């Protein structure tokens, strides 16, 4: 067998392979859990199953798309997606019947609201870095100005070389 | 010793002004003696000092006079101080000595108040050229002079100015004589050559040395000859007959064509011996006066050789005479010393094998290297002359100095700014020639303390920057000598108190003087007078400061020490002067705020003229420690800010990754917050 790179590179390759393996395993596990939970939920409360599994599709997309450390896209979209679904699920869970839920599901606005709110998670994810950049630059510049003033004072007082 | 109180400053109680009004025509010495400059006494003048009427304000009837020295030669302040403490007959008592207002009102001069003789100067009374009878000499002159010399010698003081022109009748009856003053000039300075013993007569005028009683006895003998004969040979004649003096003795020159009585000849033969050990002392003369038989030795010169040694065509009978001839013609001497002639002469004719060996060694006659053999430095030649004439003066580069005459000669050279002489004197001290001369001379004991003094002077010259070199030597060799700094020279400063006052006056003009207030003379002068504790305090004054600051803080500590210990009072002039040079000391503080604050405090101290307060301001150790600590902290902070600035600069250049990370994180947090809020509102029925 041919020698592929240095020992460090071989270790890195092995770690990468192990990571992919773990992700694949986790994905399989998640799919299995979701399938099992979905089957159970579909058999016991079909409207709820439709709302949750249908409404949480953006989260699923984000989950599949986001491989960045921290998985902030998944988190942002997930939380916003949940925030969009919770108001529809809570009355059903409180009342114990699916009548209200079925009515809401029949309305297009329900799905629009759910997906728009979920979409705002994407919006936050893509807009916030720009906004954070602005704030960061302002903070850096402000700190630099403050440091420069302090340096000037010290230099003037103690006659340091600038 | 009089510390004249003509100094005045802002401090009350310091007395009259340094400069004083010239129109007053009076100077005060020791608080009770007044010198009246309007009444000159030319008949009592000394060669180096003018005489004036002096008044004892406590005893107005006392007949006194004062002599006021110039600035050209040092006076014998140490001798004068000793004489003020002892009163005796036979010489003019010195009642007070010290600096007094100068006759022209410009500065001060060394002045001495003496008893005024009742009968005028002996030389004037007998008329120049007229002989005095042996009866007068033995009955009037000799007893008075012996009495005076006995008193002086009893105090360990040699008069060194015994000559007819310096002898006075004590009373109008002319029945007793007294010796004149001996303090206005260096020892032997004004003596005609004939009155000086052979060895000392060949030295420079100011370098003839303190000498001893034997020198006075020789001068007494010549004085008697001068009185009996009416004259003695003039300087040029004596100098021309130096070889004869060496060969036949001084008496042959002094008494040429003079034939006193046999008895008088016996006295003069005893007094005019060239060998100090053979010369009569005071007891011998008293014995002679009483008619008792005194010790007598045959008159002889210093001839040692069986046959003469020829040098430049002239015959020389003694090694001492050869030394003198060598010093007169050094180039010819070098030429002669390249041959073995002198060594052989010393060996065979004089029979002095040790001396022959020494000369042989000094002239490198045994050297194998031809270059060494042919080279004979000035130092070698001086040592050869010293070996040939160990009791004579040290002859080096045209300057002849008696070992104990270095001090006055050095002071005279400094007073007259004779750079060439100063250079030669410096070399003489530094190269140990004086020590060599003292150790070889029979005039000094082997363990004479003067040797250790010379060694310390040698050390001063090796480190002139630290020990002040020649300047330090001049004050140690001339006790009581005034400070020769250009800044105070005109004030004849002899004490630290006066030094502070004089410098304060120097700085008191409209413009602050340029230059350091503490020049080499001031430092050397003070080092000679300060106690070890004071010196230590002055040195410690600059600890912890930088080089430039060290100088000005050292100056400040120095004068603060003088102000404190000498109680000079407020010194506003000095304070202003020192303040003008304090910037380096202030700059040694790192904080500009602190510097400004200290400058204000310093200026406040300047206005009060208190140098100690000024010193406290700039030598405040608490301030300095705080300054250092704050500086270190500030430097750390400054470095941190510099590094941080660099980091922020680079961050500003590429912050997108960070912004992306932070933004995404913020988005997830925002979403979580929205979720929590919506959940809470939903559960609580807010929707």
Image: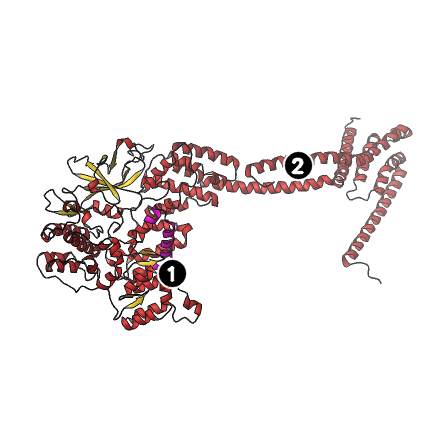
Residue B169 vs residue B485, the one in the foreground: B169
Q: Mark 1 or 2, which is nearer the eye?
A: 1
Res. B516 image quadrant: top left
Q: Is residue B508 left or right of residue A124?
A: left
Residue A60 vs residue B63, the one in the foreground: B63
The image shows a total of numbered marks equal to: 2
x and y, in percent, of residue B162 in the image: 20, 51
Position of residue B521 relative to residue B284, above or below, is above
Q: Is residue B529 left or right of residue B250?
A: right
Which residue is located at x 30 percent, y 70 percent? Answer: B346
Q: Is residue B104 left or right of residue B268?
A: right
Badge 2: chain ID? A
Quadrant of the rendering where the N terminus of chain A is positioned: bottom right
x and y, in percent, of residue B419 in the image: 38, 50
x and y, in percent, of residue B558 in the image: 38, 42
Marking on residue B378: 1
Looking at the rendering, the stretch of residues picked out in magenta corresponds to B411-435
Is residue A79 visible in this depiction of the protein?
no
x and y, in percent, of residue B605 in the image: 41, 34
Residue A67 vs residue B626, the one in the foreground: B626
Q: Is residue B92 left or right of residue B643?
A: left
Residue B86 magenta: no
Marking on residue A144: 2
What's the distance in space between the residues labelled 1 and 2, CA to CA?
A: 75 Å
Res. A44 image quadrant: top right
Badge 1: chain ID? B
């Amino acid at each position: 067998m041919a020698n592929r790179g240095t020992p460090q590179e071989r270790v890195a390759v092995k770690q990468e392979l192990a990571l992919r393996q773990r992700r694949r395993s986790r994905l399989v596990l998640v799919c299995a859990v979701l399938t099992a939970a979905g089957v159970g939920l579909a058999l016991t409360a079909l409207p709820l199953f439709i709302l949750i599994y249908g409404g949480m599709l953006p989260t699923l997309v984000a989950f599949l798309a986001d491989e960045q450390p921290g998985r902030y896209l998944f988190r942002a979209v997930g939380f916003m997606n949940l925030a969009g679904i919770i108001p529809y699920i809570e009355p059903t869970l409180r009342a114990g019947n699916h009548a209200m839920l079925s009515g809401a599901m029949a309305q297009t606005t329900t799905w629009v609201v759910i997906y728009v709110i979920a979409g705002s998670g994407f919006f936050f994810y893509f807009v916030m870095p720009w906004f954070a950049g602005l704030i960061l630059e302002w903070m850096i510049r402000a700190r630099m100005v403050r440091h420069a003033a302090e340096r000037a004072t010290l230099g003037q007082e103690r006659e340091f070389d600038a | 010793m009089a510390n004249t109180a003509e100094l005045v400053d802002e401090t009350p109680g310091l007395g009259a002004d340094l400069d004083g009004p010239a129109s007053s025509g009076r100077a005060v010495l020791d608080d009770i003696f007044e010198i009246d400059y309007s009444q000159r006494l030319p008949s009592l003048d000394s060669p180096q000092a003018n005489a004036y009427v002096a008044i004892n304000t406590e005893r107005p009837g006392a007949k006194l006079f004062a002599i006021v020295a110039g600035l050209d030669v040092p006076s014998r302040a140490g001798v004068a101080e000793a004489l003020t403490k002892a009163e005796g007959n036979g010489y003019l008592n010195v009642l007070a000595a010290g600096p007094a207002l100068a006759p022209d009102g410009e500065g001060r001069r060394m002045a001495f108040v003496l008893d005024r003789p009742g009968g005028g100067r002996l030389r004037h009374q007998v008329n120049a050229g007229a002989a005095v009878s042996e009866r007068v000499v033995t009955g009037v002159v000799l007893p008075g002079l012996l009495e005076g010399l006995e008193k002086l010698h009893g105090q360990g003081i040699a008069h060194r100015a015994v000559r007819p022109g310096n002898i006075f009748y004590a009373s109008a009856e002319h029945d007793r004589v007294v010796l004149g003053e001996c303090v206005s000039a260096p020892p032997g300075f004004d003596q005609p050559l004939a009155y000086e013993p052979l060895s000392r007569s060949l030295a420079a005028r100011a370098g003839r040395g303190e000498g001893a009683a034997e020198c006075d006895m020789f001068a007494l003998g010549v004085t008697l000859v001068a009185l009996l004969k009416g004259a003695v040979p003039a300087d040029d004649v004596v100098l021309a007959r130096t070889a004869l003096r060496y060969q036949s003795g001084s008496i042959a020159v002094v008494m040429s064509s003079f034939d006193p009585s046999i008895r008088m000849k016996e006295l003069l033969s005893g007094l005019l011996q060239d060998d100090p050990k053979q010369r009569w002392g005071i007891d011998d003369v008293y014995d002679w006066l009483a008619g008792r038989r005194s010790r007598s030795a045959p008159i002889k010169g210093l001839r040692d050789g069986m046959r003469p040694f020829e040098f430049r065509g002239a015959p020389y009978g003694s090694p001492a005479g050869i030394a003198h001839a060598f010093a007169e013609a050094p180039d010819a001497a070098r030429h002669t010393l390249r041959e073995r002639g002198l060594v052989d002469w010393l060996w065979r004719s004089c029979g002095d094998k040790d001396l022959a060996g020494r000369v042989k060694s000094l002239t490198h006659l045994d050297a194998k290297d031809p270059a060494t053999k042919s080279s004979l430095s000035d130092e070698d030649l001086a040592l050869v002359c010293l070996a040939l004439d160990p009791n004579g003066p040290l002859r080096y580069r045209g300057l002849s100095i008696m070992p104990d005459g270095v001090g006055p000669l050095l002071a005279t050279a400094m007073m007259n700014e004779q750079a060439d002489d100063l250079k030669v004197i410096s070399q003489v001290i530094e190269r140990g020639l004086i020590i060599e001369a003292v150790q070889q001379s029979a005039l000094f004991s082997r363990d004479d303390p003067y040797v250790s003094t010379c060694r310390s002077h040698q050390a001063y010259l090796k480190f002139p920057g630290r020990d002040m070199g020649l300047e330090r030597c001049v004050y140690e060799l001339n006790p009581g000598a005034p400070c020769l700094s250009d800044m105070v020279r005109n004030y004849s400063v002899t004490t630290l108190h006066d030094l502070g006052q004089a410098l304060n006056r120097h700085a008191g003009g409209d413009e602050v003087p340029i230059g350091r207030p503490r020049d080499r003379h001031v430092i050397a002068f003070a080092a000679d007078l300060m106690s070890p504790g004071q010196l230590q305090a002055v040195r410690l004054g600059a600890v912890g400061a930088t080089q430039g600051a060290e100088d000005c803080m050292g100056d400040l500590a120095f004068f603060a020490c003088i102000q404190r210990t000498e109680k000079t009072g407020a010194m506003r002039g000095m304070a202003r002067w020192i303040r003008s040079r304090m910037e380096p000391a202030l700059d040694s503080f790192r904080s500009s705020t602190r510097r400004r604050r200290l400058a204000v405090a310093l200026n406040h101290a300047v206005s009060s003229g208190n140098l100690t307060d000024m010193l406290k301001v700039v030598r405040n150790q608490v301030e300095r420690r705080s300054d250092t600590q704050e500086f270190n902290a500030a430097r750390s902070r400054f470095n941190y800010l510099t590094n941080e600035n660099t980091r922020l600069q680079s961050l500003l250049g590429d912050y997108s990754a960070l912004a992306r990370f932070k933004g995404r994180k913020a988005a997830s947090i925002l979403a979580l917050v929205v979720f929590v809020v919506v959940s809470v509102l939903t559960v609580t029925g807010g929707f």
